[in-house]
Amino acid sequence: MKREDDQQLWDLLGQAAEPALSPFFARDVLRALRQRRQLFDSVRSWFSPRKLIPVTGLAVAILAAIITVHHPTIRNSADNAPDVIAQIEPQDYDVVADLDELLVTDESSLWDDDTQTL
C-alpha cells in the first residue's frame, strides 16, 4: 500500500504512539522460555523408565488381583463330588453292590411284565 492510496490512514498511523519496550524485555523473554522448559522437564520426568516401570508393575499386580478375586479358578469335578458318596463307609460297599443287583433285576422284570401283558 502506498502513501498516496490512503493519505488519511497514514496520517492517523503517524499520530499513534510508538510502542516502548522495556529495557529488560530480552531478560523477561528468556525467563519465560526457561520456565516453560522446566515445566516440560518436570512432566517428562514422570514418564522416565525409572518411575514408569514400577508404576506399571504395580498396576499389573492390582489388575491381576482384581481378576483373580472376580473370576475364581474352575474346580475339578472330583472336588465337587456329592457329600453322600464321601460318607459311605467301607462296610457299606457290600450293601451298595446288593442294591445295584436288585435294581438290575427289577429293571429286567419290568420288561418281562410288559411282554406278558402284550
Image (cartoon, helix red, strand yellow):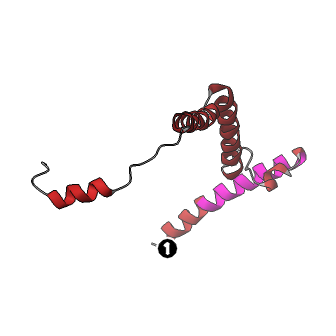
Front residue of 67 and 106: 67
Identify the residue position indicated by label 1 in the image: 117
The residue lying at 75 percent from left, 45 percent from top is 79
Predominant secondary structure in magenta?
helix
Whole-percent x and y of residue 15?
Answer: 31, 57
The residue lying at 9 percent from left, 54 percent from top is 5
- Depicted 37 relative to depicted 94: above or below: above
- Depicted 46 relative to depicted 1: above or below: above
3 relative to 35 in the view: left or right: left
Whole-percent x and y of residue 110?
Answer: 58, 65
Q: Amino acid at mark 1?
A: Thr
Whole-percent x and y of residue 107?
Answer: 60, 60
- Please state the extent of the stretch shown in magenta in the rendering: 91-107
In the image, residue 78 lies in the stretch drawn in magenta: no
Query: Alpha-carbon neighbours of circle 1 within 10 Å: few (<14), some, or many (≥20)?
Result: few
> Where is the C terminus found, in terms of image quarters?
bottom left
User: Can residue 75 be seen at all in this image of the molecule?
Assistant: no
Front residue of 52 and 37: 37
74 relative to 22 in the view: left or right: right
The residue lying at 76 percent from left, 54 percent from top is 82
Front residue of 44 and 40: 40
